[in-house]
Image: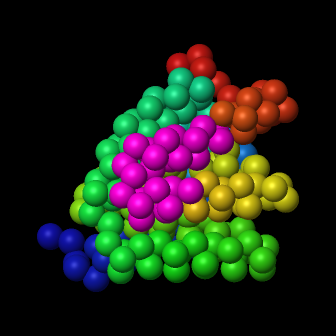
Amino acid sequence: MPDQDTTLEARSSVERIVDFLYAEITSMRMLPGTRISETDIARKFGVSRQPVREAFTHLARMDLILVRPRRATEVKKLSIRAIEKSRFVRAAVEAAALREAAKHCDAALGYQLDAALALQKKALVEGDQNLFKQLDYDFHKMICEIGRVPYAFEVVRAEKEKVDRLCVMELAKENRMPLLIEDHEKIAAAIKAGDAEGAVAAGMVHLSRLDEIITTIRINNAAFFDDTE
């Protein structure tokens, strides 16, 4: 039976490797198609190759890396078909959450939405893109919580993560954060007014912002995409 401390240490190593590679991939510091050496990662973290393999398996399940027998592991390229599937699932779940949020939002919850928007505007003024990204997640999570369907955010988050690499490439553009905040304001206003269909309409416009991003990135960075699978 394995020693408990050894098991915990191994689990910690796996988590650290997953966190590191997740950040590198979703921030686009590791570009799609980049090869990842199991040996190099093991050396970097001072561990055996076993926790690296476990971390790779975890990231593969998240659709972020491609692990193939007897071939180099690499950062998974983007797939238009996968993106379309992800967006369809997210849109369906988020629309349902928005309707529920509009139904259940009261004055106190409306104040929470206003406070969330204030933090986003502060991040905009400070030019803090990393903070804005987290606040964006928090906003969509809050909508699910207001709608009393907190579990819906697990689906939203999982699908959102699959396209975050696209978003990070465009978020740095000067006009991107103000536009997203404007979308959030319209969503919040509809929720606070109890306008379920207005909230859904605003939410779908918000999600559609990705269309232009996909088109632009696909034209300028064709090597990042692979739809041959």
Chief SS of the magenta region = helix
Q: Residue furthest top?
A: 228
Measured as percent of width and height from the top left, residue 129 is found at: 72, 68
The quadrant where residue 207 appears: top right
Measured as percent of width and height from the top left, residue 44 is found at: 63, 68
Q: Residue at x 61, y 54 (%)?
A: 183
The quadrant where residue 217 appears: top right
Q: Is residue 39 left or right of residue 68?
A: right
Q: Residue at x 45, y 50 (%)?
A: 199
Measured as percent of width and height from the top left, residue 160 is found at: 50, 49
Q: Is residue 176 left or right of residue 193?
A: right
Q: Nearer the viewer, residue 38 or 187?
A: 187
The quadrant where residue 71 appears: top right
Q: Is residue 32 above or below residue 153?
A: above
Measured as percent of width and height from the top left, residue 164 is found at: 60, 50
Q: Residue at x 58, y 46 (%)?
A: 206
Q: Is residue 86 above or below residue 152?
A: above
Can see residue 127? yes
Q: Residue at x 72, y 61 (%)?
A: 177
Q: Is residue 56 above or below residue 70?
A: below
- Bounds of the magenta segment: 186-210
Q: How is the image coloured?
A: rainbow
Q: Is residue 120 left or right of residue 202?
A: right
- Taking the magenta stretch, the answer to whether it contains residue 195 is yes
- Taking the magenta stretch, the answer to whether it contains residue 21 is no
Q: Nearer the viewer, residue 76 or 154?
A: 154
Q: Is residue 110 left or right of residue 101?
A: right
Q: Give the quarter of the figure containing the N terminus.
A: bottom left
Can see residue 54? no
